[in-house]
Image: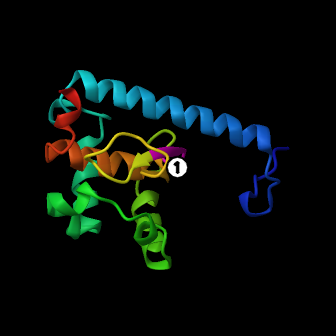
Amino acid sequence: MATQFDADNAENLEDMEKQFAVKAVMQAETYWGLLEKIPGSRLKLTKHDDEIFEQFLTDFPEFKEPKNVAIISEAEMKSVTGKARWRAFCDKFQDIEDYNFGTLLRSSASDYYTQEGTIFAVRIQFYAIEIARNRYGLNDWAKQ
């Protein structure tokens, strides 16, 4: 009989964390490689892009303004209020594969992935923010 995984009481296994980090870095490199070849405004990240974008703007109306999605505050995102808002948003996308898998998110759309300018987020947060940035043309500079 299978047992339920309890993340709150799980051991922190260093090798597992390293594997997650490697996968997150590979995903970031792949995404950046795409942005260098295709203008973000022409890029589709998932077959659910429209649904993710619409729900993102419904749940986070402040991001209807492109300048607000250009720079993401990690402190705001991970505050008590921010976590609650993001959790409610993320839970709506449980049907998307690896929606809650850890990934890297650039805090600024006008910068590369850097140690100081990268946030650890879950994949659906990455999708929501990067889909918005792409639709607003904020990532098109990377192709040049």
- Residue extending furthest right? 1
- Quarter of the image containing the N terminus? top right
Query: Is 10 on the left or on the right of 95, as rendered?
Result: right
Q: Is residue 101 magenta?
A: yes
The residue at the point 41 percent across, 41 percent down is 113
Q: Residue at x 20, y 42 (%)?
A: 134
Indicate left or right for 12 with 83 as reference. right
Residue 99, percent across and down?
48, 46
Look at the image and give the residue range highlighted in magenta: 99-104
Left or right of 33? Residue 103 is right
Asked which quadrant contains residue 41, the reply is top left
**Colour setup of the view:** rainbow
Vertical position of residue 80 compared to residue 43: above or below: below
Find disc 1 in the rendering and name its residue. 100
Name above or below for residue 125 compared with residue 140: below
Q: Is residue 17 left or right of residue 55?
A: right
Q: Is residue 122 magenta?
A: no
